[in-house]
Amino acid sequence: MDCVSNTIELETSWTRRIVVAGLLLFAFALLTVAVRGGTNSAGGTEHPAVERLDPLPGAQSPAQARAGIDLIGGWDAELTIDGVAIPLDELDRWDPKTQTHVNPLFELFFTPGPGKVFERFPQGEVCVTADIFEIVNPTNTAIVDWCFSVV
């Protein structure tokens, strides 16, 4: 009986370990999605800090159109377009006198032009990533991704 009892305890022990490991992986996956904020595909409605995306996801835009994000007060972001980080001094609302980004409306927009990282957006799909963060709590972050078509 002892041999059977030990075998049952061993099987139960491994079953518990597998169940606990599965639950931990599931919890980690949920935490990762919560921290990243998910992918924003509905015009900014998925993250409460996003008021508007421009152009809207899936929209068609000209090569010289501006692209960016409008956030609620107290939030800021860093923009990456097609894998290219947009320097602060190339964002709309850059103040060359103070060498700062003037952002009273919490908007971050980039308009292509001469001498910038994009003189015009390439034809086809263009994807934007906004790494958003709360100004008073910079560890409160999310990633908002969307794409639009340049015609």
Image: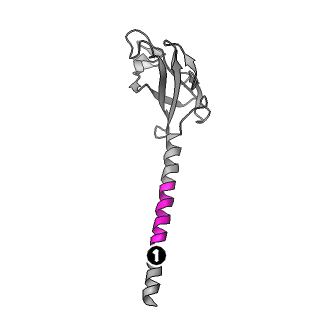
Q: Residue at x 52, y 29 (%)?
A: 146
Callout 1: 10 Å neighbours few (<14), some, many (20+)? few
The answer, for residue 84, to whether it is visible in the render is yes
- Say if the magenta span includes residue 121: no
Which corner quadrant of the image does residue 47 belong to?
Answer: top right
Q: Relative to residue 60, is residue 48 depicted above or below?
A: below
Which color mode does the image show? one colour
What is the secondary structure assignment of the residue under circle 1?
A: helix
Q: Residue at x 49, y 70 (%)?
A: 16
- Say if the magenta span includes residue 22: yes
Q: Which residue is mark 1?
A: 11
Residue situated furthest bottom in the rendering: 1
In this rendered view, identify the residue nearer to me: 115 or 104. Answer: 115
The answer, for residue 135, to whether it is visible in the render is no
Which corner quadrant of the image does residue 59 belong to?
Answer: top right
Which corner quadrant of the image does residue 52 belong to?
Answer: top right
Q: Write down the region rendered in magenta.
A: 11-26
x and y percentages locating residue 20 in the rendered image: 49, 64
Is 90 placed left or right of 103 in the picture?
left
Q: Residue at x 42, y 17 (%)?
A: 90
Q: What kind of secondary structure does the magenta stretch mostly adopt? A: helix
In this rendered view, identify the residue nearer to me: 144 or 89. Answer: 144
x and y percentages locating residue 39 in the rendered image: 53, 36
Count the numbered circles shown. Answer: 1
Is 68 placed left or right of 118 in the picture?
right
x and y percentages locating residue 57 in the rendered image: 57, 26
Q: Amino acid at mark 1?
A: Glu
x and y percentages locating residue 109 in the rendered image: 50, 20
In this rendered view, identify the residue nearer to me: 147 or 75. Answer: 147
Residue situated furthest top in the rendering: 114
Q: Residue at x 54, y 21 (%)?
A: 104
